[in-house]
Image (cartoon, rainbow, N blue to C red):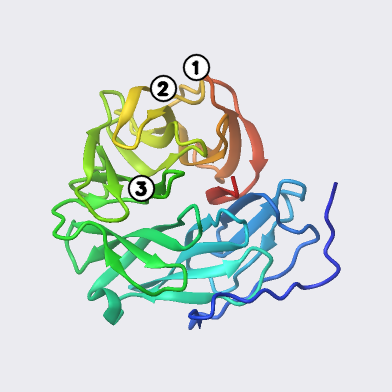
Amino acid sequence: MRRWLGGVVAVGLLGACEPSDFGGGGTTGDVLFDRGFAFVRADRNVYVVDDDGDPNSPQRLTTAGGAYTPSISRNGNSIVFVQRSGSASSIQTVPTTGGPVATLLSSNDAACGNCTNFRGPTFSPDGRTIVFAFDRGSGSQSSLGRIAADGSGFVDLTPGTTIAYGSPSFFPSGNTVVAPAGTSAFQFDQLAFVPVGGGAPNYVRLGNEVLAIANRAVISPDGRQIALDGRLSSGSTRIFVGGVTSTGISGTLRRLTDYTASTVQESFPSWVSSTELGFLFNDSGGDPSIYRAPVSSTASSVSLAVPAANEPFYGPN
């Protein structure tokens, strides 16, 4: 059943959030967002499309551009994303129904010292905290940080790190995140299992076929599987899936799809359910689009979900 909106819905953000310096506000589509994909397009604005909506006519939520890696809260009410303007970046939120954009944390805020280059923010399962990757000044090292959903209470989860971290993903318990890790953002050849409440991370190597993680590793809704975009020796990337525990990979990673052409690039996996993935698909340098594929013991074919879209994230699930 299609769910039509009679007009613009005004949704307030958390009280401690401040209005964005980059502008914001969006447009309201004809179908209320309940479950579906958030993504960015070439204009670098955040869009959403409901599963019951028209994927060719998504709802635009921001207007200022500069948006990266949107992520949907588990209750489906809010999207957190990175806003970039020149060398500055910030973590911002916007309601999934459209409305004012709020800034939670900005580059070099006093709360986090000389933090820069925010990446991959994601909500905890209970929606109370956000974990993200960031840089400490210049260099190849980076950390994982945690803030409350209103932007307060910054905590460095990996203090004194000597390596680099990528976009984190929560286990359903909310106690642990997993993130790509390695000597630099171009060499994420490990997975780091990091306790959110503090403690030493556990590092796990990826195996022989996957040389490095290109962008993201994500935990399934049931907490039993992990999906990642693995870079191969050919230079292409493929989505891999495997069993996982709170401390490591269980078994061998396997490919999601049956594509073999080196021109195919698959990236930015996101769980639609514990038996299906959405991800970015690009072949021969054309416009990237979001596709879906079932998760099974053998590689499978794909189906188009949203055309002309980038950096997808599905939710809530």
Q: Earlier in the sequence, mark 1 or mark 3?
A: 3
Q: CA distance from mark 1 to mark 3?
A: 25 Å
Q: Earlier in the sequence, mark 3 or mark 2?
A: 3
Q: CA distance from mark 2 to mark 1?
A: 8 Å
Q: Amino acid at mark 1?
A: Ser
Q: Amino acid at mark 2?
A: Arg
Left or right of 12 on screen, residue 170: left
Which x, y percent locates residue 110?
27, 81
Left or right of 294 on screen, residue 223: left
The residue where tag 1 is placed is 297
Tell which tag, 3 or 2, sits nearer the viewer. 3
Q: Residue at x 54, y 75 (%)?
A: 14
- Disc 3 crowd rating (10 Å Cα; few below 14, some 14-19, many 20+) is many
Determine contact: label 2, label 1, CB under 8 Å.
yes
Which x, y percent locates residue 228?
40, 36
For this rendering, which residue is in front, 64 or 81?
81
- For the residue labelled by badge 2, is the local secondary structure a helix, a strand or a loop? strand
- For the residue labelled by badge 1, is the local secondary structure a helix, a strand or a loop? loop
Q: Amino acid at mark 3?
A: Val
The answer, for residue 53, to whether it is visible in the render is: yes
Quadrant for the C terminus in the image: top right
Q: Is residue 312 above or below residue 15?
A: above
Q: Is residue 300 above or below residue 281?
A: above
The residue where tag 3 is placed is 177
Q: Earlier in the sequence, mark 2 or mark 1?
A: 2
Mark number displayed over residue 254: 2
- For the residue labelled by badge 3, is the local secondary structure a helix, a strand or a loop? strand
For this rendering, which residue is in front, 218 or 39?
218
